[in-house]
Image (cartoon, coloured by chain):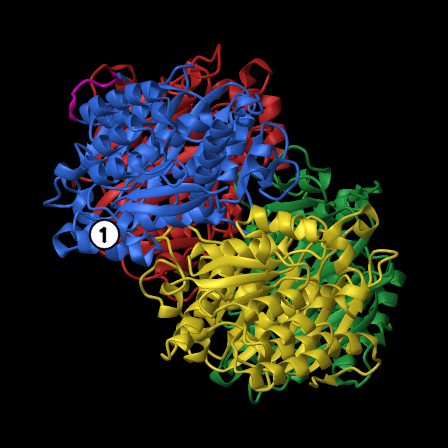
Chain colours: A blue, B yellow, C red, D green
């Protein structure tokens, strides 16, 4: 059984929408049957056609999509809606979709503001519908394994977290060159109060909390606008305190000229450490005080079901970013199906980011920008 | 427009069939509508159902599939057939499919014997249908770029080729332990005269000729059965001579205990060299006599259309094995569609392995096994 | 001509003294002829004997060494004194040596306090003698090349500096286990006010300023004592501001369980970046906005004289830590010899850390510890 | 006590002589007191002076050196002679030195021909003097550890050996450009019958036998002269059979354009494998069938005395080629001293290459060149 999927946003020329669609197809749990790909009827229809969506289900607004789909017979109606619009068009369609009985997959950061995020949390809870926020990095098998190992005590009590997310693509004033991606991401009207911190800082923040199992309690941020003329931050570094007393460093920048997107996390505990980086995503380094560092590999056969349940190819056949993204879609699908069938979802399936991570992410955005502007050294992480 | 796809083989429990299906889905050019997944009717139907294939198109033999599909109206009928059976069931279904008007995607090695391969070449040519052999490694963007760079003279005349394909999974007598993959791959009745040489040696051979642009003229092989009781080679090393006078070394083994599947190729010319390995698939090293080695990356923006046309995610978001496989499917689909529409296919689309590569691959199998048994040092590469 | 060398500290069982001696021997510019290896006469003599030092020149105090050596005829007398004692015994012997006409090589951090450091700066200047502080990492050829490239504008105006120095060896309460190295380094009476910040933070600080060519103006530090019972910091992270407006992050820790000593620096400018790490010390990555990253190598032939003048083995024969240390000794020796011969020293020779770097290093120690204790976010870097 | 050392060859402008001298100094076991640095008296004296050798002990021939030194009182006389001349001047001085009571360190390959090698073996044995052949790669701590692990059964019975030594520096006709190193190494009158095979093939051959603990029984070689006009081989690949039934591949080339000198060895056994490469010399990968690969590091604390006894700096401070070379000198010195003192040498000290390795190396040269010319596939490895 495939789940019937609709998409809001992601028309021709968009970047992340195409990624979501690939992710939805890889494991064959979804069938894209509807979409509001563009507010321009012609564009929406053309986008839909190219994607095999029937013209009568290529809508011109999310309101129309939700309203019309709701009226369809249950066995035709969309079950899951993917929302891949810019940040300022996250909250309203998500709320409307949930309130009208649709499960939702939403691109990060969750909302335009923390207030919206908290409001959305209530909506998710009251709706009883399932919700997934696409923090892709938590979809990597070895990121999941790192979390599991740490949770199992493999490295002892966590003491230190280093997470970094260096990009270089905004090293120049790209938003002045008719670059669609650069334009909305640096536009406060579309991105919100944060640029790099919202775009990639939230990924790093989420990754650190996910892997370490810790929650941030205080932060101390240096937030910069490096490129002249830019309206939002393009660089930042944040010192962190966690609820168990550990400390951390988060580095996220979009002006690391020559760097691409090599997300990396290191967590150290009392008796060992773990290290993962996206460039060699199928590898996890596990470190010990008195033994050789081990190279854990996705196909190794000694990993938990959080790895084996999130990979497709045999040992030594690298999977990457699209498969990590697909793991979010797959696990969400299996959870939705279990819900439909009244069965209990497995722990591996439930391991996708939800609305709580979204609220924490938006709290990060607001707290980190506030800290960046503050003369106070340490500010409480408030939600 | 999606191409209608059928699959022969690849029922529940099979490995490579699932990979083919993912590859077919990633870029959304195919719709799986039929299959002969198993000779057991129940199993075929169950496999089909799980894949969204209507029960009346889940056949129990390739003959039935081809016969029945042929009778369907053109707009319902399957257009492309994927054949993912063990080697001994490659030739007949492929021949029948081609002769009945279907385009074919076939798993490697192409046939059970060189004779079959040569016969198949004739069939492909006389049928006028399109044919793709899934030598996956040629689907990697950076492997394609390596070929293009060398063809453009970037490293001068090629002098030396090193290609290696080390695996460790057959280090023990796995075929004695009810392992399906190990069993047929080490069974002369199913694999043919070669084990490792057919399974992975052909990949290495193909990769070397593809990237270097050279053709093998002589070879000198050391072929071994290392694990006691095994019926086919599980290890080999081959010295090679190429048509431009260059020499090469090919190493393929399945008893490299602890190794996974890290295919690697290095080619050296008069003025530089290239190096690629699957573990860091999005990277190509380009070497020079008097300049720093360069790290070419898939998203770098300085690559040819053979890279940009074969990637999906932006710079620094790694793609892997499934995407390389998907590139074969995508390029084949675009070529088939161009053919259907009477348009000319682009060079990037046409860059998939075909029947000539298949014939050369089977010639490699026969030549290398013969050389392994021969006392003669250098034997001509004969087809 | 070899320079006559004496050593203060570094008796049997010491660690860094042995490293200094190897460094002094590699390029054959020194002859160890005297030493105050221990305050115990027997131990000093035994240490000296094992090192080929005549018993009458194995002194029991630095005062005795300086006094007696001064009385020797000029052609017998020590010319350079290496001081390798713990931090609290740096200032006095260095001052005395300089004031009595000896050139000095001193282990880092320069002194016990900033006040001592500033006083020492005056002594160095008034003495007219040469002084080298062994910030080893600036002795690596590729660190030097990074500095030269940045100074030449290769990456444009510097915007961001990341420097990290993770160690794991103090993850447990090693000072409770009769470990000599751990004991003095965690003892405020011997190390001063800082533990990790003085021991390795100063290296990271110096490396960042050396490579970037920038000077720190503000800092914001998180300084931690992680291991229970420890008296000095064993972990810290520091946000930095530089005099050209760039920002930086410095991470130094001794509780990164499983890590060894992999110092790493990344500097990004407007048009590119550099990356160096000690584990692959003979490599420097040079990054660009629109071109492939380049792997610069010590033996590449395209580097400056700051590389070729600081290496010994041909391309591809790795040199390491001891050679980096030896480069400090070599360059200091060549500078001393030039001074003796009244010649001008070459720029490559003069590229060793001196008293100004020492003052800045001690200022870092005091500023960073103060910042760690302060509620103020950004504090000026004051000397 | 330092050993009195003389050097034959290695005058100003020579490459390997300088490396030997650094190696001799690092651990302070030698004092260079004499030399026959050049047959030109003026040059020999100048070279000696620059090295601190008294003019009356800067000889103009090895004969003079040996004769005169022999006449000196025992406590002044040279004890060890290092011979660093081109291959054609290895045998005679070594023989004369041994027969006159001097211990000898000789650069590889041992002699000009196998006949000389066998003759030298007799001389060494009859002389009762100690002899070291500088196969540097066996001086790396992690190469030693690999040997020890394999000998201890860590990876089970060895099945496969891959050893490679790619260089690119002879990619052009360098010997036509007044390059001293290129000239003698490609000159049959000075190098003997082999170029690359003698220069670097012998290193690879020795490394493979040393690490694996196996002896070669058969070989099958492809030997090439790639660069036009060159008189000796500059490229080769060799298939090998070992005495326990294992097989191997040896690749050595000097025309791998863009490559430097990254010697690499992989050995696979029934239950695991090891991998080492010079570029990351302080690391040894240890592989298992069912466990994660381990990254063994020189300073890890879990290694044998063959590591701890052959390193100087603490964990994470990389040592390199010069230290590997120094380990040969150090171990030889400790063995010579033990011999002088009538004590038994420790196993770690005795782990340096000797005359038997030299004979096997020269047998490799002759066998490999003969095999290269032969039409016979497998030829016995004969001595």
Residue at far top of view: C229
Span of residues in magenta = A373-380
Residue at far bottom of view: D229
Determine whether, in the image, residue B19 is placed left or right of residue D85.
Answer: left
Q: Position of residue B308 (x, y in %)?
A: 36, 64
The residue that disc 1 covers is A44
| Mark 1 Cα shell of 10 Å, populated few (<14), some (14-19), many (≥20) | many
How many numbered discs, if any? Answer: 1
Q: Position of residue D253 (x, y in %)?
A: 61, 72
Foreground of the two, D129 or C247? C247
Q: Quadrant of residue A309?
A: top right
Query: What subunit carries mark 1?
Result: A
Name which residue lies at 56% across and 67% down. Answer: B69
User: Is the residue B326 above or below the residue B306 in the image?
Assistant: above
SS assignment at label 1: helix
Foreground of the two, A12 or B268? A12
Q: Position of residue B77 (x, y in %)?
A: 50, 66
Name which residue lies at 44% across and 37% down. Answer: A328
User: Is the residue D9 above or below the residue D128 in the image?
Assistant: below
The answer to whether residue A343 of the structure is visible from this angle is yes
- The answer to if A370 sits in the magenta stretch is no
Determine whether, in the image, residue D51 is placed left or right of residue D352.
Answer: left
Q: Position of residue C231 (x, y in %)?
A: 44, 12
């Amino acid at each position: 059984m495939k789940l019937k999927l609709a998409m809001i946003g992601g028309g021709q020329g968009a970047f992340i929408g195409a990624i979501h669609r690939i992710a939805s197809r890889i494991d064959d749990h979804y069938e894209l049957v509807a979409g509001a790909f563009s507010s321009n009827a012609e564009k929406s229809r053309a986008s839909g056609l190219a994607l095999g969506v029937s013209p009568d289900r290529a809508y011109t607004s999310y309101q129309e999509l939700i309203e019309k789909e709701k009226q369809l017979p249950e066995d035709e109606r969309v079950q899951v809606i993917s929302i891949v619009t810019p940040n300022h068009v996250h909250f309203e369609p998500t709320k409307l979709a949930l309130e009208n009985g649709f499960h939702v997959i939403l691109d990060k950061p969750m909302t335009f503001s923390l207030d919206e995020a908290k409001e959305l949390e209530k909506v998710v809870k009251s709706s009883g519908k399932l919700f997934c926020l696409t923090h892709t990095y938590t979809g990597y098998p070895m990121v999941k394994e790192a979390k599991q190992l740490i949770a199992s005590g493999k490295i002892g009590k966590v003491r230190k977290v280093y997470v970094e997310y260096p990009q270089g693509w905004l090293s120049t004033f790209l938003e002045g060159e008719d670059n669609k991606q650069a334009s909305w991401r640096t536009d406060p009207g579309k991105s919100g109060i944060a640029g790099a911190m919202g775009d990639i800082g939230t990924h790093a923040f989420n990754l650190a909390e996910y892997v370490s199992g810790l929650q941030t309690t205080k932060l101390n941020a240096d937030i910069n606008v490096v490129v002249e003329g830019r309206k939002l931050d393009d660089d930042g570094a944040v010192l962190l305190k966690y609820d168990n007393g550990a400390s951390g460093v988060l580095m996220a920048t979009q002006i690391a000229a020559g760097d691409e997107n090599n997300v990396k996390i290191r967590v150290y505990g009392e008796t060992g450490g773990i290290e993962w980086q996206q460039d060699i995503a199928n590898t996890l380094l596990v470190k010990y005080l008195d033994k050789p560092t081990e190279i854990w590999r996705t196909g190794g056969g000694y990993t938990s079901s959080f790895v084996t349940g999130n990979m497709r190819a045999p040992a030594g056949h690298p999977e990457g970013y699209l498969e990590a993204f697909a793991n979010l879609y797959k696990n969400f699908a299996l959870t939705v199906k279990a819900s439909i069938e009244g069965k209990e979802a497995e722990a591996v399936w439930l391991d996708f980011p939800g609305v709580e991570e979204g609220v924490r992410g938006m709290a990060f955005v607001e707290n980190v920008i506030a800290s960046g502007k503050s003369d106070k050294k340490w500010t409480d992480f408030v939600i």
